């Protein structure tokens, strides 16, 4: 795993509590009560015993290269630590089922700004509330559970549905889209990019949504109507959390007639692929377009500048949204309608949640 060391194992190896405390500022990272991860090979002879728990050299290299301090890695690193905390917790009860945000971590369902909480668990008989774990007393159908790395959790589909109520409809919608995308296309995003989207993909979406969500929705004790509404709108074509939020915003504004990942051709060559296109108005939307510049530099920026100018020449109106501009409906709508006021006349029935 990720160099996990439990307190009892450290004590059996002769490590004192004082030495553990000293190592926390050096080569040991505390994940939870009595659970640690070894993050580097240090030169302190007194800490040599911790190296015996190293089983993942990539984890050591990751810290040696200072990546946790990289601003671009910080959020993902925090999510990964939260996932390790859930997977390494040693005191689950036999009937425990990990759910909500903790289950999302297990299944690598992307969330944004999820609250820092104790591990979230459902149990049919017991209730526990402390700094480490929050155990809710309620039943969960066996059909909505699965086992991952010896951890029993809600299935990805049920997890996404639970997030609708436990976090927000926006978080649940984004989670449902991620679950659908992996179900239909797999989780190798590099391969998806190389192969492109199958030509019949959108025709297969309704059947895939029914296969994934119909039964879990029917088993919900509350929130079925909302889940059914969202299930009728999700798509496997959102390539990020931000795109999912933008898609939901368009539906909330009543702009349902849009296409995603629309390929624009300039003569015989492919010019670009739009995140969203509102066809009737020829308004093209790009979402969260700045992060790639951090990863690929200004060559990408220059290329997109040329594409932008060509799109304008072809008669498109182009609007680019930063990540934080899609997180709130008011900010999103103000920018959208200020730059494309003609869209106000195309709004239909707004989605109500």
Image (cartoon, rainbow, N blue to C red):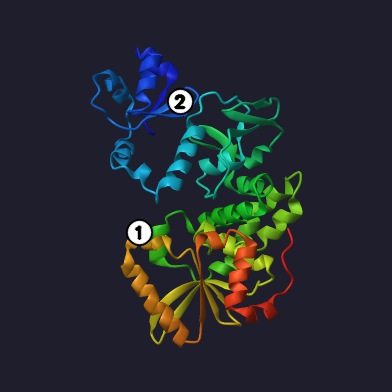
Instruction: Return the residue at label 1.
Output: 295
Residue 191 in sight here: no
Q: Nearer the viewer, residue 136 or 18?
A: 18
Q: Residue at x 24, y 20 (%)?
A: 45
Quarter containing the N terminus: top left
**Residue denoted by label 2:** 35
Q: Secondary structure at mark 1?
A: helix
Which residue sits at x=63%, y=30%? Answer: 134
Image location of residue 251, percent across then percent down: 66, 67
Q: Secondary structure at mark 2?
A: strand
Nearer the viewer's eye, disc 2 or disc 1? 1
Q: Quadrant of residue 94?
A: top right
Residue 317 is at least partly visible in this image: yes
- The tag earlier along the polypeptide, 2 or 1, is 2
Residue 263 in the image: x percent, y percent?
47, 76
- On screen, residue 69 versus residue 262, left or right, reads left
Looking at the picture, does residue 343 appear above or below residue 9? below
Q: Position of residue 4 (x, y in %)?
A: 40, 28
Is the residue marked by circle 1 packed among few (<14), some (14-19), or many (20+) residues within 10 Å?
A: few
Q: Is residue 25 above or below residue 346?
A: above
Crowding around mark 2 (Cα neighbors within 10 Å: few <14, some 14 to 19, many 20+) is many
Q: Quadrant of residue 176?
A: bottom right
Disc 2 to disc 1, C-alpha distance: 34 Å
The answer to whether residue 33 is above or below residue 191 is above
């Amino acid at each position: 795993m990720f160099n996990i060391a439990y307190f009892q194992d450290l004590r059996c190896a002769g490590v004192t509590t004082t030495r553990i405390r000293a190592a926390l500022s050096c080569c040991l990272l505390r994940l939870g009560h009595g659970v640690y991860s070894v993050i580097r090979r240090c030169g302190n002879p007194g800490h040599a015993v911790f190296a015996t728990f190293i089983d993942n050299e990539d984890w050591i290299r990751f810290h040696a290269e200072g990546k946790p301090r990289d601003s671009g890695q910080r959020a993902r690193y925090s999510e990964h630590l939260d996932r390790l905390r859930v997977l390494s917790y040693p005191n689950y009860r036999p009937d425990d089922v990990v759910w909500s945000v903790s289950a999302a971590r297990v299944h690598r369902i992307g969330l944004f700004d999820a609250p820092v909480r104790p591990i979230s668990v459902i149990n049919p008989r017991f209730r526990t509330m402390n700094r480490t774990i929050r155990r809710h007393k309620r039943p969960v159908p066996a059909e909505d559970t699965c086992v991952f790395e010896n951890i029993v959790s809600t299935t990805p589909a049920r997890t996404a549905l639970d997030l609708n109520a436990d976090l927000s409809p926006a978080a649940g919608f984004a989670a449902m889209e991620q679950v659908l995308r992996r179900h239909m296309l797999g989780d190798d995003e590099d391969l998806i990019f190389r192969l492109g989207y199958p030509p019949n993909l959108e025709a297969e979406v309704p059947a895939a949504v029914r296969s994934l969500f119909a039964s879990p929705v029917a088993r919900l004790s509350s929130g079925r109507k909302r889940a059914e509404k969202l299930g009728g709108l999700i798509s496997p074509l959102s390539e990020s959390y931000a795109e999912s939020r933008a898609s939901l915003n368009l539906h909330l504004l009543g702009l349902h007639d849009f296409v995603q990942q629309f390929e624009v051709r300039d003569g015989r060559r492919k010019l670009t692929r739009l995140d969203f296109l509102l066809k009737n108005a020829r308004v093209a939307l790009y979402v969260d377009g700045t992060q790639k510049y951090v990863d690929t530099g200004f060559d990408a920026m220059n290329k997109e500048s040329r594409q932008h100018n060509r799109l304008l020449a072809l008669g498109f109106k182009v609007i680019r949204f930063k990540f934080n501009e899609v997180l709130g409906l008011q900010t999103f709508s103000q920018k959208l309608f200020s730059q494309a006021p003609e869209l106000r006349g195309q709004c239909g029935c707004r989605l109500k949640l």
